[in-house]
Amino acid sequence: MRVAVGAGALLLVLTGCGGSDDGAKESSVKRTLALMDDQQSVDAGDSLDVEVLDNDSITLESGERAGLLDAYDPAELTLTIDTDPSHGSASVSGATVTYTARDGYAGEDELTYEVRVKGTEVPAATAVVRITVSAPAS
């Protein structure tokens, strides 16, 4: 299993917390995406929908990890195909990648997807979808 991680920084400055401001300190919390690879299977010539973000997560400002779709609406994310599959085609709709296997091909295929959080400095991250394409039963 491969995990892709990106890192960003958020600067927090605490004011009005009591005490003096002598030696005031700044703290930064990094937000990171952790995208998990996916594995699927399909018959040659058929299509399948992969909900690729279901197993992906992000570290929040609190330092806690949350499911990416728990922290963000899919409209707040940019999901793109980073590397096309070699033996089929792929497209994106919302948080779903649709893979269509080429007729007559049986074997392994893969594609890479990238996720960005819109309007933030959280770096993009990528993950792989591995697909086993089987010859249809005759």
Image: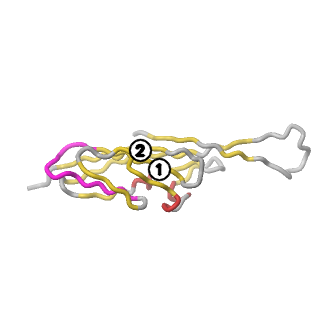
Magenta stretch encompasses residue 116? no
Residue 66 left/right relative to 17: left
Residue for point 32% across, 57% down = 98
Above or below for 114 versus 74:
above
Q: Which mark is residue 126?
A: none
Q: Which residue is nearer to you in this view: 125 or 58?
A: 125
**How many marks overall?**
2
Magenta stretch encompasses residue 108? yes
Rendering coords of residue 57 (x, y %): 51, 50
Q: How is the image coloured?
A: secondary structure
Residue for point 70% across, 42% down = 28
Q: Which residue is nearer to you in this view: 19 or 82?
A: 82
Q: Which mark is residue 115?
A: 1
Q: For mark 2, what is the residue?
A: 127
How many C-alpha atoms fall within 10 Å of the one at disc 2: few (<14), some, or many (≥20)?
A: many
Q: How far, Cα to Cα, is label 2 from label 1?
A: 9 Å
- Looking at the rendering, in which quadrant would you find the N terminus? top left
Rendering coords of residue 114 (x, y %): 44, 47
Main SS, magenta residues: strand
Front: mark 2 or 1: 1
How many C-alpha atoms fall within 10 Å of the one at disc 1: few (<14), some, or many (≥20)?
A: many
Magenta-tinted stretch: 96-109
Q: Amino acid at mark 2?
A: Ala
Above or below for 115 versus 70:
above
Residue 45 left/right relative to 73: left
Residue for point 53% across, 53% down = 117
